[in-house]
Image (cartoon, rainbow, N blue to C red):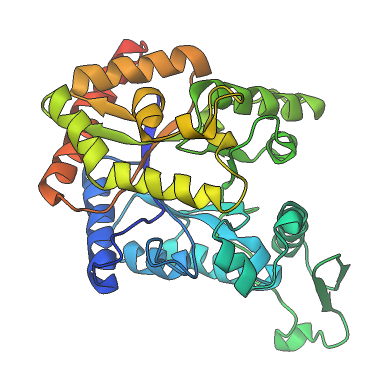
Amino acid sequence: MIDYGMFLMPVHDPAKPPAQCFDEDLELVVRAEELGFSEFWVGEHHSSSYENIVMPEIFVGKALGMTKNIRLGTAPVCLPYHHPAHVAGRLAFLDHLSHGRINVCFGPGAIPTDLEMYGVDPKQTGAMVAEAIQIIMTLWTTDPPYDIEGRFWQVRVKKEIRTELGVGVFMKPYQLPHPPIAVPVISRNSVGTRIAGQKNYSPFSHHMVAGNVLQNHWTTYEEGARAECREPDRKKWKVSRNVFVADTTKEAREKARNLSLGKCLEYILQLSDLGVGRGMWKRDPDMPDTACNLDYMMQDQIVAGDPDEVVRQLLRMIEETGEFGTLVMVAHDWDDKGAWVRSLELFAREVMPMLNKRLGYA
């Protein structure tokens, strides 16, 4: 059976007051739990008026008090911006506050001004993420003394340990050995995706890549797992998609294109032009950048329609990708709250039961 979750980047209208954005995002968490979503992920950005949640752990902390069962996660913690000992400590603390309802996604940053502000070389982010994860795992699964001499960070706890006074005792997570860990995957044939397979982390596929790239994500992850003599579990794979459901397909496609979903994807395409370019969003790498636009996204990547049409599109995607564990719906700004809430309800109450039935699950 395919579970369903929600990913809040977030992307909001910069003209909307931040407090209103956050109130609506928290309301979304509550509604998601009521509608049976199994997990809810929150992104981290530091210098964007569109993507305006700067510390997902604080958001998650408030959402924990407004919900009872839904699992809440950071997606991702941008590791190059933080000392890994700080990340390990605050996430372990949050895990205890949640009584084990925390998921974790570790990854690099993406906003160019975030990288600039923290003095991070974009070419080093992959190595920084790998080193930070290793340090966090060491802190979560072993006891001091620590004498870690990394390329980017150092952790030393040895001279001042006083265990009889509780000094030098590092907090471990509530979930042992640690919360479930996911890593974002975007590119074809990514070394990071292969390492995720080796480490048995959950691959979390980006919402704007094409179906053939999603299929490559799994193949690459599978290669990494089998290199460690481990049979990969498709239930661990999370696939995020931009989905809009309405009572008619005509309405759904019009709203998907003209409301915040379409505006969000155009924003990301323009942001891509400032960095690595649009290549990662193309089904065919030889496609010209001018053709990689919202029209292409509406045709190939965005899932929009009435419930029957959305199920048809998802089944077509699954024919290309194979099954996965969780379909993660991307959240967008409530520029038409009624339409977005209706989309959520149709997705949870009609699309997902119908999809699982068509896949042969009771």
Q: Position of residue 310 (x, y in %)?
A: 27, 22
Asked whether residue 7 is in view, the answer is: no
Quarter of the figure that contains the N terminus? top left
At 62% from the left and 46% from the top, the residue drawn is 276
Asked whether residue 159 is in view, the answer is: yes
Q: Position of residue 110 (x, y in %)?
A: 57, 56
Q: Is residue 268 above or below residue 191?
A: below
Q: Is residue 206 above or below residue 300?
A: below
For this view, does 355 lie left or right of residue 340? right
Residue nearest the observer in this picture, 42 or 227: 42
Quarter of the figure that contains the C terminus? top left
Residue nearest the observer in this picture, 145 or 360: 360
| Marker count (numbered) | 0
Residue nearest the observer in this picture, 272 or 352: 272
Q: Position of residue 221 (x, y in %)?
A: 67, 29
Q: Is residue 19 above or below residue 232?
A: below
For this view, does 322 lie left or right of residue 116? left
At 83% from the left and 88% from the top, the residue drawn is 160
For this view, does 357 lie left or right of residue 275? left
Q: Position of residue 190 (x, y in %)?
A: 70, 35
At 81% from the left and 67% from the top, the residue drawn is 152
